[in-house]
Image: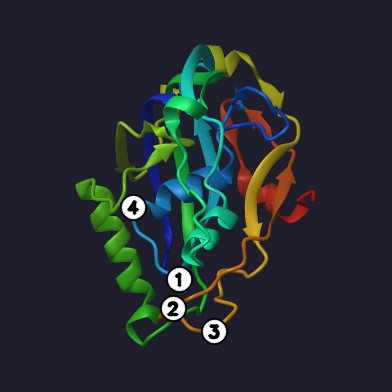
Amino acid sequence: MSRGFKIIVQGDYALFTRPEMKLERVSYDVPPPGALEGLLKSVYWKPAISYEIDKIIVFNPINFTNIRRNEVKEKISLQSITGQMNGKGADPCVYTSEDRTQRASMILKDVCYGIEFHFDMTGLKSTHDDEDEKKHYNIIKRRLEKGQCFRTPCLGCAEFPVKKIELVENFDFGMISTEILSMGDVDLGFMSYKVEFEDKGIPINNDWEHPVFLDKATTKYYRPHMIGGVIDVRKYREVMKC
């Protein structure tokens, strides 16, 4: 059976942070596949399935805007939490009034993407029902049609939620802006493809009821071209750069 879908995603703003920009946040021109997989997991996800992005269509012109945001500089340290648990009186709190700082971000505005994707079966944490491809397909289809999600899908950062997700039979390539079409074949350079955790989503203690996962992860990179507004992710999947 077909496991594929086509959706159109719209948002007022998006921020797909470039990892090489350390001090200020600067967005990629287009979304990395890993960010779109995360968006889909906000709609429906189970360990028994994994999403793969096959194609990205950029409909709107790539426009940036600069904003400044208040952010907290520090994280709560593990040492302070364990210290308090052990009765050593360590303060695990972060006080935003003291640790707040203002950072600039260069973000995308007025975005609209077409996303073609499919799902694969992983065999993880699978009961008999979890191995039913048709069941997963129908659930995903129903949730996309009804606009359902278990957490708000976002475009790179939680501050920039998706405004609309529309399930379509086919993409209308006439919707691609003339500005994008006039760019022709664009080498987007090396981009993050996705972040992969070393545990592959399997608890290292083999206990799905009380799972313990590794925090270690590596980023996979690829070098896509956008041709007439279309990024054919599928053809780049086999030539990843690490």
Residue 200 versus residue 110 in the image, above or below? below
For the residues labelled 1 and 4, the Cα–Cα distance comes to: 14 Å
Disc 4 element: loop
**Whether residue 52 is visible:** yes
Residue depicted at 41% across the width and 23% down the height = 175
- Amino acid tagged 4: Val
Q: Reading the chain from its start, which is encountered first: label 1 or label 3?
A: 1
Front residue (pair 230, 125): 125
Near mark 2 (Cα within 10 A), the count class, few <14, some 14-19 or many ≥20, is few
Q: Secondary structure at mark 1?
A: loop
Q: How is the image coloured?
A: rainbow
Q: Residue beneath label 4, please?
A: 43
**Label 3: which residue?**
206
- Please name the residue that numbered disc 2 is placed on: 210
**Residue 172 percent across, percent down from the top left:** 40, 31
Mark 4 packing: few (<14 Cα in 10 Å), some, or many (20+)?
A: some
Quadrant housing residue 171? top left
Q: Secondary structure at mark 3?
A: loop
Sequence order check, earlier mark of 2 and 4: 4
**Residue type marked 3:** Asn
In space, the residues marked 3 and 2 are separated at their CA atoms by 9 Å
Q: Give the quadrant of the N terminus.
A: bottom left
* In front of the other: 75 or 211: 75
For disc 1, the marked residue is 47
Give the Cα separation between the discs numbered 1 and 3.
14 Å
Residue sitting at x 73%, y 45%: 221
Distance CA(mark 2)–CA(mark 4): 24 Å
* Mark 2 → mark 1, Cα distance in angstroms: 15 Å
- Kind of residue at badge 1: Pro
- Above-or-below relation of 236 to 11: below
